[in-house]
Amino acid sequence: MSRSDPRPRNEARSKALMERALAHLRADPIAMRARAHNHLALVARKELADPRYLAEWAELIQADPDRIAAATLSDTDHAITLRSMNPFFIPFDERDQIFAAFRARQASSHETTGT
């Protein structure tokens, strides 16, 4: 039995998480940007990511949410990498809801396809 490639599902989920983060950014830009800057500083101190991407995120955090969306929600390799480093905090209950929705969709697709 072969398992389907999880990348499309993971990318859709990462987009959903990014979209939720952008909604929070639009609702409370000061708090969201402050937390994102703190997160980036921690990642930089611990050398957990490529400094080029950290510098790009440091710039993007200050940008208009539509610019952030344009940079992060496409299917390019660069956008995928940026999403993987999303510095915006999403409350755990909302993250859990997104993950649960994707698990439910996956279970439903397995029931309908018989895989």
Image: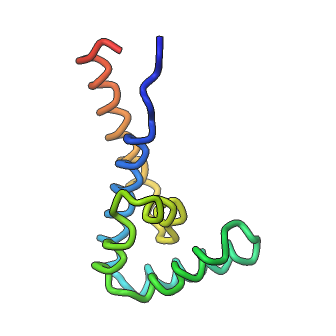
Seen at 32% across and 63% down, the residue is 19
Residue occupying image coordinates x 51% and y 85%: 34
Decide if residue 56 is on the left or right side of residue 23.
right
Vertical side of 50 occupied by 59: above or below: below
Name the image quarter holding residue 99: top left
Q: Is residue 51 left or right of residue 3?
A: right
Name the residue at the right extreme. 46
Up/down of 15 relative to 6, above or below: below
Estimate the x, y position of residue 10 in percent, counting from the top left: 43, 44
Q: Which residue of the protein is positioned furthest toward the left in this rendering?
A: 112
In this rendered view, identify the residue nearer to me: 35 or 61: 61
Q: Is residue 27 visible?
A: no
Question: Can you give x and y, in whole percent of width and height, for residue 50 in the image?
Answer: 66, 70
For residue 73, which quarter of the picture?
bottom left
Toward the viewer: 23 or 94?
Answer: 23
Quarter of the picture containing the C terminus is top left
Q: Residue at x 32, y 72 (%)?
A: 69
Q: Is residue 49 left or right of residue 82?
A: right
Which color scheme did the rendering employ for the protein?
A: rainbow
Residue name at image x 32 percent, y 20 percent: 110
Tell me which corner region of the image, top left, top right, bottom left or bottom right, holds residue 71.
bottom left
Residue 102 at x, y percent in the picture: 35, 39
